[in-house]
Amino acid sequence: MEKIMKRLYKEKLFSEWLKEEDIDFVIEGLNSLLYSKDNEEIINFAKESIRKDIPFGEFTILSDYVIHKLHCQIGNFIINRDIFAKIYVDSCLNKDLDFFKDEINFYKQVITKTENEIFNIHINWLLDYVKAILGEGEFPNLDPKSCQISKLFRKHNFNIASKQKQKFLKLHKQIHYLANEALKMYSKNEYFYFMNIYMELRSISLTFREVIGNIFLYDKLVSIYIDPITGINNRLKFLEDMKEYYGKTLLLINIKDFSKINLTYGAKFGDKTLKQVSSFIENLEILNIYRVYADEFAVIVENNEEAKKIFEHINENITLDEIDYIISFYGSFRQIDRHSFEICEYAMLDSKKIDLIDANKIDFKKISIYKDNLSVIQKLKVALVSDRMKVYKQPIFDYKANKITKYECLMRVEDSDGTILSPAKFMDILESMAIYSEYTKGMIYKSFKYFENKEYEFSINLALTDIENYNTINFLKQILSNYPDVAKRCTIELLENEAVKNFKLVNNFFREMSQYGVKTALDDFGSGYSNFAYVFSLELNYIKIDGTIIQKLLKDSKMEVLVKTVVDMAHSLGMKVIAEFVSQEDIFKAVKKLNVDYAQGYFVGKPEKDIISS
């Protein structure tokens, strides 16, 4: 571990927040988190980490990364992680009590008396929430529809632009939602997840307070067109000026990890950072600059090439001397027209916060895709910590036994309103997210628990990325060892087109699974029209014929020949065949005549949350 840590430090993976002299301390702490059974040791490590100003979020990312690099057993990590997080929780919440009180005094100077009331209610609501978590009082109203802010907002009927009002109400709803989710995690002693949700709650709260400030700026003190923090033009002025700059180029930039700077060093230091950034850019050869939102700046330049030059000039060229921190940016640029601002905003969503994106290549119609994806990403994150990933079961009919003997486990996600999302709406997005492996682990665990005391066999779908992920496979093996009898009723399915991508790895995996009594299946066989001899050399128990072939069975005689060939080859090698997409009785009977072993599809039964005993 020591060699890996020091190499990673030299590669600047975490050198921005960890001092070199503290590497040995962190190595010792990571070992404790992995293997120690002494709670006091973990508590002391957490306290010392706080004293050394080691950020909680950065440290947890590092620990997961190192564990993956070492390919080691996670040991007591999950249990110890919550013990470690609990110390951070207590420290963070106690600091916030003072921080929120300071916020009230700060905003008294820039907003009017009536609107100051709404700001104070929010801060006091946060104070009460934190006190209640610490056991020092009652929880405030956690219902966004009936809390004090909602009542005051309706009472005064503030004269606010429609978009600002929508943003205000959306953030207000998000804050209450996260507060409820964080409380659930805290009540279950899952402090690691609580800390992550609370940090997001706190970040959104900062944005909410800024929105309040932007909406209710005291007009006698500050012009409606001037940003009070940086002194440059604001979003309102930018929107009014846009038409004047048609044909020029908009460079939209964000400060990377600004929320972490704000959370770690406080709002005043964050404001100072914004001033420093705006002042630096103002002195460059630009046409204009605006602070349009939080840590986001709109810079107007002559053309696209100038936009690239400006970005290169500012990126990692502004230093916060007090904390010896070099600011990085991400952003997008586009020739200015009526939709350029909106397109640049959505282009940055695709930047992964590391790049400068040329938004000239993005069609305005594609924005709807970004909106949908962003919505799904948020839903998937919340569903994970809220335990709303569900396992649905689709029955598989055994022709020989003349009854249902198997079920396929299928992933579904439950939205906050109870709506069930099908894989078609989220799977492609989920597979690109860092939390994908956690969903896979959840599917494995929940499937085993559900069928633990049931007589049926069941199957679980894995992707090639799952097989390549050491932590996922390690988790699977742990489950198989803990549930040896259930493992013998489990089948692991892999798509045909994925199996041929890394034949050797897949075959070795299948052989390893057979040692636990687990059966294996090749899903969607025929969809890729692979070489039969190549595919049949895999260590398989089942072949699942692709549904598109089965659906054409009654209309295309070639499909009948193909199915019969697959069945004969599979049976000669000791494998059984499952037909997918058996959607009607005629197909059900035709499949049976071809000596197929199993049928799966809507004629047999749809995927359901629970198995209904016949």
Image (spheres, rainbow, N blue to C red):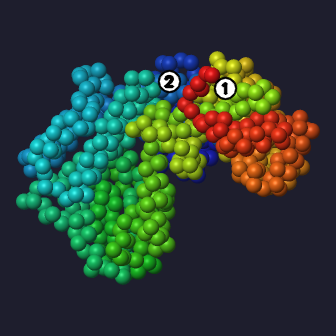
Expressed as whole percent of the image width and height from the top left, the position of residue 511 reads: 82, 35
In-front residue for pair 157/280: 157
Give the mark nearest the N terminus, 2 or 1.
Answer: 2
Q: Quadrant of the N terminus?
A: top right
Expressed as whole percent of the image width and height from the top left, the position of residue 564 reads: 86, 46
Q: Is residue 202 above or below residue 311?
A: above
Q: Which mark is residue 51?
A: none
Q: Quadrant of residue 251?
A: bottom left
Q: Is residue 104 above or below residue 331?
A: above
Asked if residue 378 shows in the view, the reply is yes
Which residue is disc 1 drawn over? 479
Expressed as whole percent of the image width and height from the top left, the position of residue 264 reads: 35, 43
In-front residue for pair 525/169: 525
Q: Is residue 394 left or right of residue 323?
A: right
The amino acid pointed to by label 2 is Ile
Which residue is disc 2 drawn over? 42
Q: Nearer the viewer, mark 2 or mark 1?
A: 1
Q: Are marks 2 and 1 in contact (CB under 8 Å)?
A: no
